[in-house]
Image (tube, grey):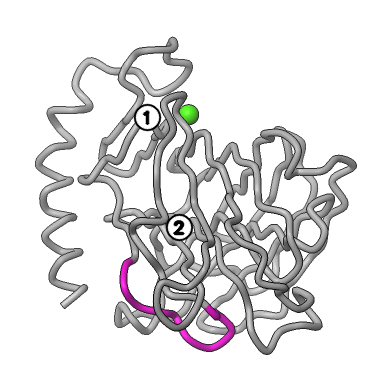
Amino acid sequence: MKQSKWLIAAGVAAVISAAVWAGMTLANDPPGKETVQMKEGFLQDDFNGYQEELWNKADGYSNGSMFNCTWRADNISFTEDGLLTLSLTSPSAGQYDGSEYRTAVKYGYGRYEVTMKPAANPGIVSSFFTYTGPSEGEPWDEIDIEFLGKDTTKVQFNYFTDGAGGHEFIYDLGFDAAEEFHTYAFEWKKDSITWYVDDQPVHTATDNIPSVPGRVMMNLWNGTGVDEWLEPYDGQAPLYASYDKVRFIPE
Ligand SMILES: [Ca+2]
């Protein structure tokens, strides 16, 4: 079901992209100008609203495992000043209500950037990552920027290659990411991944690098059974993660 929806969305995106892209430049658009960009392989969204041709909202299901929430499309919203807000709220039924936003199409090697402000609270994660996996009939390849709400003065980088993880790296930011917007990025190449904080390279991995294009994704969720990693979630809600813009520039 989802697969066919995604294929349709990809087709629509491909048709729209030629028209949207024509005559536009990628970088440094002045305020007020349309800042959604689509061209084969490129992505730019300043989050001035929901661009249905670019993104899907997860809705009405849970990832299970360590995710102790149900994704709710209603928990994805936009502010008048151009911020995407992901919310974690009290349960409307059963589990807490989380939020996950993902691109309609997949992207491969290149530079992924996000300007964001994570939520701060024990037991939760705010994220920006690329993902594909068995749910799409592909190997599990993933590259992560994850803020553990228990301590937002640090960020965790990680990646999975055909399901093999264990590459967690905690970087001490020197500031509290939940206090103000900063830009985080990673450059994914065939033989390396380098993560950036405010344009400064801070970590590089070269071992068993993933190779399968994935969707660009963001989510806000609370964990279960992973208290050693996230600390217990105390039920504090609502919580919000804010995203100002994202960009992908292919290699
Ligand atoms: Ca924005």
Evaluate if marks 1 and 2 touch, with contact meaning CB atoms under 8 Å apart.
Answer: no
- Principal SS element in the magenta part? loop
Provide residue 191's location: percent of width, then percent of height.
Answer: 61, 61
Whether residue 18 is situated above or below residue 129 in the rendered picture:
above
Q: Is mark 1 within 8 Å of ligand 1?
A: yes
Whole-percent x, y for residue 1 in the image: 15, 78
For the point 62% across and 48% down, the residue is 186
> Picture coordinates of residue 23 (x, y %)?
22, 15
Mark 1 or 2, closer to the camera: 1
Q: Which range is magenta?
A: 59-68
- Which residue is drawn at the image coordinates 72% and 73% (left, top)? 234
Q: What is the quadrant of residue 228 in the picture?
A: bottom right
Amino acid carrying label 1: it is Asn
Q: Nearer the viewer, residue 214 or 71?
A: 71
Residue 194 covered by magenta stretch? no
Q: Secondary structure at mark 1?
A: loop
Q: Is residue 2 left or right of residue 179?
A: left
Q: Which residue is mark 2?
A: 217
The residue at the point 41 percent across, 56 percent down is 75
In this rendering, the answer to whether 72 lies above or below 40 is below
- Label 2: which secondary element: strand
Q: Residues within 10 Å of mark 2 (few under 14, many from 20)?
A: some
C-alpha separation, residue under disc 1 versus residue under disc 2: 17 Å
Q: Position of residue 174 (x, y in %)?
A: 90, 42
Amino acid of disc 2: Met
- Residue visible at 71% across and 61% down in the picture: 157
Please give the label number shown on residue 48.
1
